[in-house]
Amino acid sequence: MAAAIGKKHWVIPEGYIPPDDREKPRQFISHEAACILNTGDGDAHIQVTLYFGDRDPCGPYLVTVPARRTLHLRFNDLIDPRPVPVGTDYSSVLESDLPIVVQYTRLDSRRSDIALLSTIAFGSD
Amino acid sequence: MAAAIGKKHWVIPEGYIPPDDREKPRQFISHEAACILNTGDGDAHIQVTLYFGDRDPCGPYLVTVPARRTLHLRFNDLIDPRPVPVGTDYSSVLESDLPIVVQYTRLDSRRSDIALLSTIAFGSD
Amino acid sequence: MAAAIGKKHWVIPEGYIPPDDREKPRQFISHEAACILNTGDGDAHIQVTLYFGDRDPCGPYLVTVPARRTLHLRFNDLIDPRPVPVGTDYSSVLESDLPIVVQYTRLDSRRSDIALLSTIAFGSD
Amino acid sequence: MAAAIGKKHWVIPEGYIPPDDREKPRQFISHEAACILNTGDGDAHIQVTLYFGDRDPCGPYLVTVPARRTLHLRFNDLIDPRPVPVGTDYSSVLESDLPIVVQYTRLDSRRSDIALLSTIAFGSD
């Protein structure tokens, strides 16, 4: 089994949840996710901070990824301290107490078909 | 709050604004963006230079991202010293006086549905 | 000819095989792939481990990429020790005895058209 | 003006040119591109080698990117020593005598709409 791989700080400059019909099946509602992998033997405690164009940062949102688990965290599901506004440009920073690896993905289904984008986030120690 | 994260030079080799109907709603017009996050306590002053296949580079375009803010900069909106030509291959380089993180995204809606691509840009000190 | 380029550990935090009609032509069935390049003169022996949100990791899946060859490995085709569940969030880690480079791609064709995403995986020594 | 930024070796593990109707307008034919930026004062001379799953590597394909220029190189256009086969898994390695930055993009238009993917390639010195 691999030891803990990754970095403790991750940055995702993109961020935009397309306004969408919330009555669709969950897998087809437009959403954004930070996919977080913790390969280590300890639980990773993560603070997420959101940045905006016209107001102060919001956070921290507190997330735990257990040892040897993955979490595909939907930004749409973040509510405390405040829901992520839809149709609004933002960025996010994840700070973990243990090494993790983060990938960012958006599914846009405002039109009849699906569009996808994804990238490994920017990692920093 | 995180200190300034990132690098001062960022390169985006891809660049192509699909020719599109400019009467569409802004969020659906084909466009390209450099999403820029400044997590630091000072305003980041950025010079953007565009490179082409058949002519000299154009720039600098001057952009400021305030402290603890994000800017999703549309290349379609750059006009000084010259608008970015549509339907033309180009690349871009961003040089900042403070550390930033840059991600590049294109939305292509020439057909009835949307296509997306995105990647963290190439960072260098 | 280039010597062996790359790293020995690669992480892909995203992972989700869209449930799809398995009677479609192979190239149009929704799938995920790890594209693995071995530019070196020796065969690369790779162990793939899958991570989940709610259960222990599964693996290793054993894969060999011969010298100077590429393998576009479909996660859909992994069966030993266990098929990759569809419609389920997962992550993957690849550990190789020789340097390789890994890129992750998904093709989603649940709707009438195709959606694609791709990124170079996160490499670590 | 920025000095030469980048690395001399670049790897793109993904590679697959979707079989398509070659009578479409050029911008809508399914294709793959290596977008190459040379920010330096000298011309960059690049050797491209293609790797396959079931045969020896093919190359070098010789490409020059002039000083302070970008080249969006379509793999579909490579013909010497041999055209890139469509509908075939491959990978590519670019070796340059000067620093460059490389990004990989695919446009898939086999269906009625467009799908896009893109990532900065894996760079190495």
Image (cartoon, coloured by chain):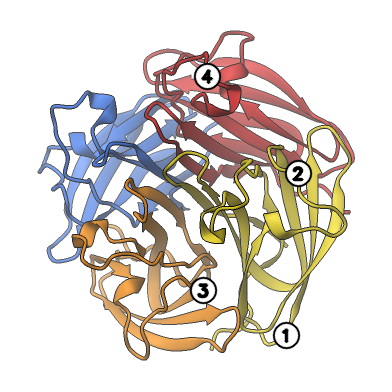
Chain colours: A orange, B yellow, C blue, D red
Residue underneath mark 3: A90
Residue B37 percent coordinates (x, y): 61, 72
Name the front one of labels 2 and 3: 2
Q: Amino acid at mark 2?
A: Pro
What residue is shown with label 4?
Answer: D24
Q: Are marks 1 and 2 on the same chain?
A: yes
Q: Residue at x 65, y 83 (%)?
A: B40
Labels 4 and 2 positioned on one and the same chain: no
Q: Which residue is mark 1?
A: B42
Identify the amino acid type marked 1.
Gly
Quarter occupied by residue D58: top right
Q: Is residue D34 left or right of residue C112?
A: right
Nearest to N terminus: mark 1 or mark 2: 1
* Amino acid type, mark 4: Lys
Q: Residues within 10 Å of mark 3 (few under 14, many from 20)?
A: many
Q: Residues within 10 Å of mark 1 (few under 14, many from 20)?
A: some
Which residue is at a point 22% across and 46% down the rendered structure image? C18
What is the spatial separation of the Cα atoms under label 1 and label 4, in whole angstroms? 50 Å
